Amino acid sequence: MENIIRIDDNVGEIEVNNADILPANLTKIIAKFDIIRNKISEQKNSLDEVNKEIKTFEKLINNFVKNYVKKETKPKKPRKKSGFALPVTLSDDLCDFMDCEKGTKRARTQITKYLNLYIDENNLKNPENKRIIVPDAKLRKLLGDEIEGVELTYFTIQKYMNKHFV
């Protein structure tokens, strides 16, 4: 009988026919090859897993950097005032009400703050429903006769203030 020892590099196995006649040392060497191959395979799998984790981490970092750069590189331009923040010329009646010079320019937001302060200081809120404003003579003169019989609130007061913005 002939002893056949064939090592297949692609499969990574050693095929032995009639292994009983092989020396004991050669059998141990073949077993060691198998152990080393298994260890290499385990190491390769571990490295593949670590590589996947690194790629995931790189993607997270790249996304963070991209978003951070987007936010930081845009120059922040000061916004141009518009709408209620834009100063408008006030009517003479409103200037008298606010004790300021005639022809003064102010933003509507400032006027609203002044009105709210005036209402609070003069206790012009309905005690039962604090949203409703009960105007005094000075505020009634400013808002005009149109407010008679109307439930005046912080929201509806703006409608009656429009005529004072020129």
Image (tube, rainbow, N blue to C red):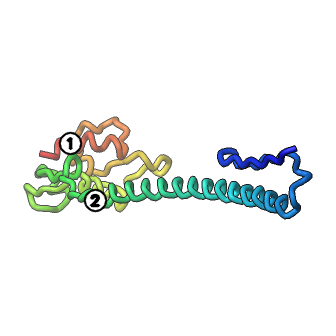
**Cβ atoms under marks 2 and 1 closer than 8 Å:** no
Mark 1 surroundings within 10 Å by alpha-carbon count, few (fewer than 14), some (14 through 19), many (20 or more): few
Residue highlighted by disc 2: 73
**Occupied quadrant, residue 27:** bottom right
Q: Nearer the viewer, residue 1 or 94?
A: 1
Whether 150 is drawn above or below 73: the answer is above
Q: Residue furthest toward the front?
A: 1
Q: Earlier in the sequence, mark 2 or mark 1?
A: 2
Q: Nearer the viewer, residue 90 or 54?
A: 54
Instruction: Identify the secondary structure beneath mark 2.
Output: helix
Q: Residue furthest toward the right?
A: 20
Residue flagged by tag 1: what amino acid is it? Answer: Asn
Residue flagged by tag 2: what amino acid is it? Answer: Thr
Instruction: Tell me where residue 120 appears, x and y as whole percent.
Output: 37, 59
Mark 2 surroundings within 10 Å by alpha-carbon count, few (fewer than 14), some (14 through 19), many (20 or more): few
**CA distance separating discs 2 and 1:** 41 Å
Instruction: Identify the secondary structure beneath mark 1.
Output: helix
The structure residue drawn at horizontal position 49% and vertical position 55%, both measured from the top left corner, is 60
Q: Quadrant of the C terminus?
A: top left
Instruction: Tell me where residue 61 appears, x and y as whole percent.
Output: 46, 58
Residue highlighted by disc 1: 162
Whether 25 is drawn above or below 142: the answer is below
Instruction: From the image, state whether disc 2 or disc 1 is nearer to you.
Output: 2
Residue 54, numbered label: none
